[in-house]
Amino acid sequence: MLSLLRRITQEVAAAESLSAALDIIVRRVRRTMRAEVCSVYLVDPNSKEYLLMATRGLNAEVAGSASLKPDEGLVSLVGRRAEPVNLEDAQKHPSFHFLKGTGEERYKSFLGVPIIHHREVLGVLVVQHEEKRRFDESEEAFLITLSAQLASIIAHAEATGAMTVFNKSQDITHSDLRYKGIPGSSGVAIGTGVVVYPPADLNAIPDRVADDPEKEIADFREALEGARKDIRQASSRLSQHLSSDERELFDVYLRMLDDNMIASEIETKIKAGNWAQGALRQVFLSHIAQFNMMDDPYLRERATDIRDLGSRILSHLQESAPSAANRFSEPSIVIGEELTASMLGEIPLDKIKGLVSVRGSGNSHVAILARAMGIPTVMGAMDLPYAQLDKKSMIIDGYSGKIFTNPSERMIESYQQVVDEQKVLEEEFLVLKDLPCETKDGHRMSLFVNTGLSADIGLSLDRGAEGIGLYRTEVPFMVRERFPTEKEQEYIYRKQLEGFAPAPVTMRTLDIGGDKALPYFSIKEENPFLGWRGIRVTLDHTEIFLGQIRAMIKASSGLHNLKIMLPMISNVAEVEEAQSLIRRSFMEVKEEGYDVQMPQIGVMIEVPAAVYQVKALASIVDFMSVGSNDLTQYLLAVDRNNPRVADLYSPFHPAVLRALLNIVIDVKHEGISLSVCGEMAGDPMGAILLMAMGYDTLSMSSTSLPKVKAVIRNINVEQANDMLEQVMTLVHADAVTQTMTRLMREADIERLVKPSKSNQSEH
Ligand code: PEP
Ligand code: MG
């Protein structure tokens, strides 16, 4: 049963169009269940009617035109109830409605299951029999399982325009097609898309119009020859170590490459207009899908070999292709299936207008970097047909997470107003640079910045930061091909410390794991956010930890403005162990003759265990900073990186607010400084609430700093306390944000938060 389900799902996923996919569904389900009829109805998003899209057993001629009203017939009953309806004699049911022209009058038994994606009923899958009998439990379970698996494929296909349904043109050349993602970094970008992709990843290659098909064919042939050479070399290199059976595998590879069919299929696609890499992807993925569908496990395994061959040819092709940096002749909107910090590192910053990542969420690290750089960003645009967007004109709205492809003049004009308004606001904020961050009634707050890139230093000082509250040291580790040496680290850290001296610079020790991978230090885990992450990795690798600490302390020589912060602390022992290593490093560096002082040592409070042990931790450290990004993730058990659960991720969830308030209450009398350095601190709404709770330092991206300062300078403490008091009584995260929006409007500070145009519903 399992393999049957898998095969049907794979076949459907590989279909080239919605109608082909639906046709496979009805054909395969009818055969597998030995049903006389199988049909699929999809809901028209406009009229809400159920349109018969595909059928086997009913009159196929009416497919595409016969439909049921939202409250008509058993099909709509399944949709409205969002649960299966299983009847021995459908015609006796009061909701039965005979759909003219289908020929269904012969069929008595009826089983309909809803096709549900993200709580929305997309349609109904129906099987019918002439004989009066209830479908049994296992038949019902099979149809439910299949429908659940098919739902996301259908939703994706509908949304990405792989299909034409309901006369809603999905042609990417049409104006103002709208796609939904998750806000990553605020701001609007209007420009042309450039699709980037990791090297040698067949799936990630976009389609692109070939400028010179002849050259593309020549490049492809050369790459093919390169791949052949690799295999011959590998075969002779390994010949003494392999049995004849194993050597045979290389011959099979070579025969596949010599098979003119694949090569000529690729060349045909190039002649039809695609560039060599796109044509290679199309042809290889379709062959891989065919092998994956085979019943014979040996043949199914061959899909891996085919993929390997495709990747080999691809890496040869990519050797001759221009580098990412060279492809950016003008500032563009960078689009990727999964953008990473190292990908961004390869593109000159002045060439990035906006960012779109199909995977990831608003609190993924790439979104945090984008906010630090002030680049409008949309994350988690799961249904975006990104492979087709190279060189296409588009608008991205980082406030709401929307993307418009091929925008009309009207849409461009309207969004241009948002861009202009944003500029005006930014200029207004410039005058705030040298003014203190204090409320109207004189309560002083300290605003620090989060950094990671060297470019941050100048930007942060320009915007009036009072110090660095979080320097994410993993960023310089991520953009290299090996661990940086102690000397290299010292140089990088010195720039941060010097740039801000005498103001304090809080350097966090390496926080890798979770969604922060180093290309040269792979951590593969089932559950990376609960695994080997942050302090857990560095305490297990003292050579990395000590090298980093020594580099930090040496870099602070003569400046004395270093603070060291430990990430992912979940127990007291980790702090004690790290402290003793830091003390040891300090003594060593001092003995080497450096003019250094013992740095203050602090911890991040970002794991629920640390919240409950906050007093014990406070008694042994010099400072604390709440990492609200991870604290939200771990308290709510919501992966900060997963777009599927992004709606559940909110630092304004009452449980998170309660934890934040309790931390202040618990450490108020411990005499240590307490800050927040998660993204919430840079959100004006969050900043107001945190100030009212009693946090005295907020650390945020330099882009958020002027906005937060403007907001704080425009309210008084009493107003903030009143807002906190009101929201602490609420039980829903949405109610908290709605109430805060209203209260901020009443206090006349909403205007400072985002351009008024970006709120308009037409967007
Ligand atoms: C946090 O978790 O809030 C934090 C500041 O650290 P990071 O986002 O780097 O995990
Ligand atoms: Mg964190």
Image (spheres, grey):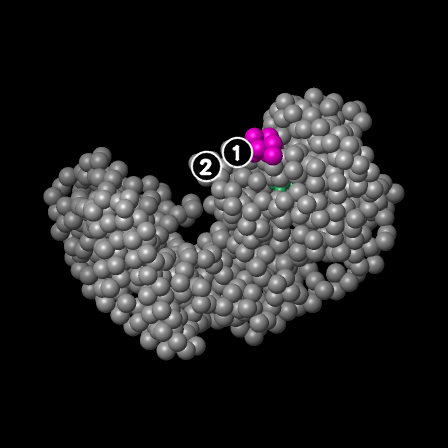
Position above or below: 584 against 432: above
Q: Relative to residue 261, is residue 50 drawn left or right?
A: right
In the rendered image of this protein, does residue 584 appear above or below residue 520?
above
Ligand 1, by image quadrant, is: top right
Q: Secondary structure at mark 1?
A: loop
Q: Residue 413 bears which disc, if any?
A: none
Q: Earlier in the sequence, mark 2 or mark 1?
A: 2
Find residue 402 and report its horizontal and vertical position in percent: 54, 59
Residue 340, given in percent of the width and then of the height, sits at 54, 52
Does the numbered disc 1 mark a residue whose Cβ is under 8 Å from ligand 2? no
Q: Determine which of the numbered discs, if any, sits on residue 532 in the image.
A: 1
Q: Considering depth in this image, is 365 or 80 the residue closer to the camera?
A: 365
Q: Which residues are magenta?
A: 535-543
User: Disc 2 marks which residue?
Assistant: 525
| Relative to 58, 683 lies left or right | right
* Circle 2 crowding by C-alpha within 10 Å: few under 14, some 14–19, many from 20: few
Do we see residue 354 in this rendering?
yes
Q: Are marks 2 and 1 in contact (CB under 8 Å)?
A: yes
The amino acid pointed to by label 1 is Trp
Q: Amino acid at mark 2?
A: Glu
Residue behind label 2 places its C-beta within 8 angstroms of ligand 1: no
Quadrant position of the N terminus in the picture = top left
Residue in view at x 33 percent, y 75 percent: 272
Residue farthest front in this picture:
240
Residue 148 sits above or below residue 23 on the image: above
Please tell me which residue lies in front, 684 or 98: 684
Magenta stretch, overall SS: helix
Apparent side of residue 531 relative to residue 733 in the rendered image (left or right): left
Q: Quadrant of residue 334?
A: bottom right
* Residue at image point 39% right, 47% down: 117
Is residue 625 visible in the rendered image? The answer is no
